[in-house]
Structures are given as structure tokens and as C-alpha cells.
Image (cartoon, helix red, strand yellow):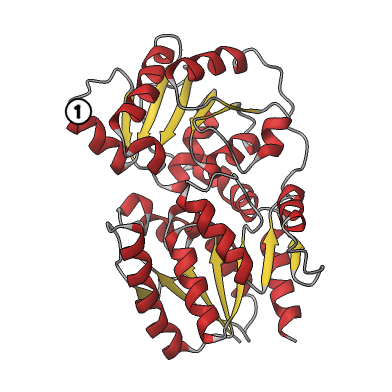
Amino acid sequence: MKIASILGARPQFVKAAMLSKEWAKLPEIEECIIHTGQHFDKNMSQVFFEEMNIPKPQYNLDINSQSHAEMTGNMMMAIEKVLLKEKPDWVVVFGDTNSTLAGALVAKKLGIKIAHIEAGLRSYNNAMPEEINRIIVDRISDLLFCPSQGAMENLKEEGQEFGKSHSVLSGDIMFDALLNFKDLAIQNSSLKLGLENKAFALATIHREGNTKDWENLKEIIEALEEINKNLRIVLVAHPRTKRMLQENNWQSSLILIEAQSYFSMLSLMSDSDLIITDSGGLQKEAYWMKKPCLIIREETEWMELVENGNNLIAGTSRNGILEAYLEIKDRKLNFEKPFFGNGTTAKCIVEEILKFSM
């Protein structure tokens, strides 16, 4: 049986690493990795394959830096050629990126079964491109692997409860990755910021809604600059965020660093005292690392963590972020609830795909 995995963005490489380990145990399985090139920076792409020993992609499509429509269309044309050549039995897509949407649409048109990893998530904000992608992919996939009970409930409310053989409460494959790589990442960390034994917050701001307009980004950066007077902030500058700061001649007092590898991010999170982010993945990783988290968005897909009190939606205004910071820094937090499985998600996914193929 042949599996084609469609990858394009940082979290997808991490998830694929865990599945590749499981596929490698089965001699009857051949995996074909297709890298769309959506994330092309070395620290957001190539280094993930090196750190986690992911098999090198058989195909690198090098499609990036385009509009959503152009990127998705070009990916579809390129992916179609690969799938027609490789003739996989399954296409596995991850998350909610343009790569995810393109891979799923092509597979559906070609009559190839689709497994969607991280299905059922909803922010209920249709202005987010990711929300549109995940809704469409959920609708056309054959197997839906949900990371949490909340995701399962979302599918049920939409009338998409296909039964246990189609919608599966698998747990979160990112938890598998963190359990596997955390200690190794911390031991091998070479990133030195001069903050050893000092309190600091780790921040990432990358979503299009926060970074495409300077006035929006300025509100966020001003809040971070104010927090930085009390708690040092290390901002991992996404290329888009960095470009906006440079174009507007912003002289920052924050510690600005380049986009980091997965291992470096795990090490930074382990050493930090607070996570400030608009990333869905970091919201969960903060919980697993037992760190409070400020969400720089108006909503989140991971409401379990907000309702548990560990994560706080701060919004995107300067005052809202500052108020949320003052609130969360004094909270007593509980990190013990197993919202996202027990670290055996990859095994569950492989078993279900094999079962569904019989």
C-alpha cells in the first residue's frame, strides 16, 4: 500500500515525523512525501527533516510567496502530476494550510482516499484562510482524525458524524512529537540568549490577520514593548513580521531572533515563563510544557485550554493584551488534564488507516 503525505508548513513536518516512524515499521507500506515548499526558509523547512530524521521528500514543489488563490492553484496542478504518477492508495493531509487544501482537493478529484490529521477544529472566524481550508478538507475526507473531544463535537454539530469508522478521536500527534523529542531538544540546544536563569516570555506573531497591516501589528508590538519592561520578551520574528518592523523603522527593545527549528523552539519554551502567541500549535505546546499562554487573537480552536484557565484570549489591541498579561501572571494553573490523548496518536492513525483499507 502506498501513502502520499502532503507537507508544506512547520507543524506538518513535525506531525509527519511521527507517522513516518510508524510507517517504517511496516514493510508492506511505501510512503511518498510531497513537500509543496509553502515554508521555504531553512529554519522553517529543511532543518525539520534533519533534526527528526524524516525521510527526504521525493518531491519538492517549491511553491510559495504567492496569493492564496495562485498558491493553491499551482499546488493543485503540481500535486496532480505527482499523484497520477505515484498512484497512492491514500493521501494524508495535516492541519489547515493551503498545502492541506490543495492536496485534499486533488485527491478527491482523482478518487484517492483522504485522511485528515487534526480534523474538526473550528475558530468560527471565516475571515481566517485556515478556517475555510479546514472546513472544506473535513467535508471531503474519508477518515477524520480528531485531536480532542471538542473537535469530535464540532463535527457532530455540523452533521458530519459519520460513525466511529470515519471520525476517530485519535489524540494530538503533536503531543507524540513533544514526548519523543523534548529531552533531546533541551540537551542539544545551542541557542544562547544571555537569559540563563532569568525570567522571560517567548512570543511568536505570524498570522496574516496580525501582520499584514502595520496598524494591527503596531498595537501588538506596543503591548509587547510595555510587558518587556517587567518581563523580558524574546520575539521569534516570522519573516513577514520582521519585514513589517523593518519597513516601518521600528526600533524594538525586545530580543528579536530569527525563525527557529522545532528543537530550538522546544528548548526556548522549556526555559520560558510565559508564552505569547497567535500560533495554534504553540498554544498546545505551552500546556504540555506547563506554561501559561496569552493568545494574540480574538478566538481559538483550542477552547479546552481557555476553559481550563491555562490559556487566555488576549485579543489584538494594546490595552487588551496588557490587561490579559496582568490577569494571567497571577493565576494558579492546572496542567494535569489529558485533553489531547496519551502520546500514542501516530500508532492509532496508522492502525485506523490500515483497518479502513481492508
Quadrant of the rendering where the N terminus is positioned: bottom right
Residue 103 x, y percent position in the rendering: 47, 72
The percent position of residue 182, horizontal first and vertical second, equals 57, 44
Residue 174 in sight: yes
- Numbered-mark total: 1
In this orientation, does residue 37 appear? Answer: no
Q: Which sits in the foreground, 235 or 148?
A: 148
Residue 71 position within the rendered picture, expressed as x and y whole percent measured from the top left: 33, 64
Q: Nearer the viewer, residue 259 or 188?
A: 259
| Viewer-proximal residue among 142 and 287 | 142
According to the picture, the residue beneath numbered tag 1 turns out to be 248
Q: Quadrant of residue 90?
A: bottom right
Quadrant for residue 314, please give it: top right
Q: Amino acid at mark 1?
A: Asn
Residue ID at (39%, 26%): 234
Left or right: residue 11 compared with residue 157: left
Q: Residues within 10 Å of mark 1 (few under 14, many from 20)?
A: few
Q: Please give the name of the residue rendered at 55% of the width and 79% of the height, measured from the top-left corner.
A: 108
The residue most toward the right is 164
* Left or right of residue 198, residue 113 in this image: right
Check the image and report above or below for 257 versus 82: above
Q: Secondary structure beneath disc 1?
A: loop
Q: Residue furthest top?
A: 230
Relative image position of residue 319 (x, y in whole percent): 47, 15
**Residue in view at x 70 percent, y 26 percent:** 309
Work out whether 128 lies above or below 55. Answer: above
